[in-house]
Amino acid sequence: GPETPELPRGTSCTLGAQTGGCPPPSLEAQVPWAPERAPASPGHANTCYQAGAWYAAKLSWGRGFLQGGFRSGIYGARRSQQKFKPPARGLRPGSQLQRRARSAPRPAASLARPAMGCTCSTTGRCPARSQKRQRAQQPKGQVSQELTALKTENHAPLHEDVETKKALLLEEQTREIARLLQGHQEETERLKEAHQAETKRLTQDIKIQVEKERDLELKKQLSEQFDTLKREHEETLQELQRAHDQETLLLRESHQRSQSSLQETIDRLNSQLESFQEKMKRVEESILSRDYKKHIQDYGSPSQFWEQELESLHFVIEMKNERIHDLDKKLLNLETVTERNLLLEEKVKTLQQENEDLHVRTQNHLTMTRQLSDELLVVREALDKESQLREQARREKEELLYRVLNGDSSPTFPIPSSEVPLIAT
């Protein structure tokens, strides 16, 4: 605000005379307001000081209105009031102003005292006091005229300036509010978009993390299943390899036995055939020689004999060929039967192996079923035990609640430490 104006030196203290604290100009001979002429009494100093502060505040208020509007005027008036603070109840003892007041010569009017036989004391009316009172009332009109003129001079332009300032301030505040609202809306939109983007990013990150954890869990489960299947496959492969080796050994032994038996049969049949052929040859030779000799003795010519013998030999050869064909057929049938037997043996072994596998699986299933049954029994026992514990805890809790509600002062029952988690749950 503007500086608070001080009273010029050489002017009379008319405001103090108006309030009745200062002596009128005629009695004090137009005492200038200066530090050299301090008031004579502490009450007079307080009154003059308050009047000067009020007048300076008025002037500062008017100048503030002219220069900066309503706020500047009020601010200047407050500054003036703060600057012109009245002293605390009179003059401080030993201050410079009090020392000057003591050393200053007192006026004759204040030194004059009425005598004991003054007519003013007898009549109750003093002409000096009445004149002083009349002269003190004269500056009141001048001060009121000055204040009225000051108000009339500053009222119209101040009012217009105040209205203009108010309109400008209102418009500026409206623009500022609109700008702030727009900025706030833009900031809100930006924060909302940022929040949505951050939420979307966090959602994607969480989804990716969940997918990664799910993939890791699936990989872990698949690896465990793969290890289990691999172990089972290796065990099954080892069992099948052992079974195959045993079956191969058995088949080789049976094949060797069958082959040896067949070879023995073939050798035996061949030996029989050779012996039979030898016998037939000997028989034929003996028969031919005997018949030949007899025919020569009887007929003398061997032609018919040889013809008959040739026919009989052809017949025998045909019979032998048929016999050989029959034996060959039997041999082929035996080989076919042998092959069928081998195939049937292989099928029997395969079925036996499958039967053994099924038996092993059945045993495994039975073992697993027994384990599951045992686990089910254990779980049922644990469930029954937990149900009993929960029921016991519920009864104890109801009993404790009943005791608390009824104000029973009986000693509380002990609670085992193993039942505390169940009660807490």
Image: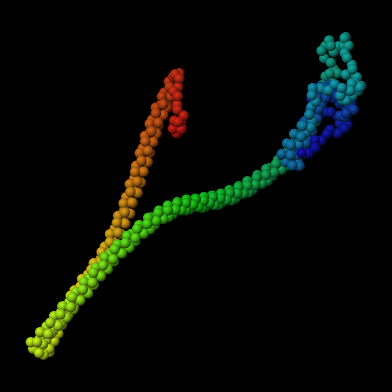
Seen in the picture, residue 41 relative to 314 is either above or below; the reply is: above
Above or below for 160 versus 77: below
Q: Name the quadrant of the N terminus.
A: top right
Question: Which of the pair 286/115 is nearer the observer?
Answer: 286
Task: Work out whether residue 175 can be spotted.
Answer: yes
* 303 horizontally vs 379: left or right: left
139 or 313, nearer to the observer: 313
Residue 74, quarter of picture:
top right
**Residue at the farthest left position:** 298
Q: Residue at x 82, y 35 (%)?
A: 5
Q: Which image quadrant for residue 344?
A: bottom left
Q: Which of 76 and 321 is in front in this view?
A: 321
Quadrant the C terminus occupies: top left
Figure coloring: rainbow
Look at the image and tell me whether residue 331 can be seen: no
Q: Tell whether 302 sits left or right of 403.
A: left
Name the residue at 83% across, 23% down.
91
| Front in this rendered view, residue 110 or 239 | 239
Location of residue 104 in the rendering, given as x and y in whole percent from the top left corner:
91, 23
Q: Position of residue 415 (x, y in %)?
A: 45, 26
* Residue at 43% from the left image edge and 24% from the top image edge: 400
**Residue 182 in the figure: left or right of residue 28:** left
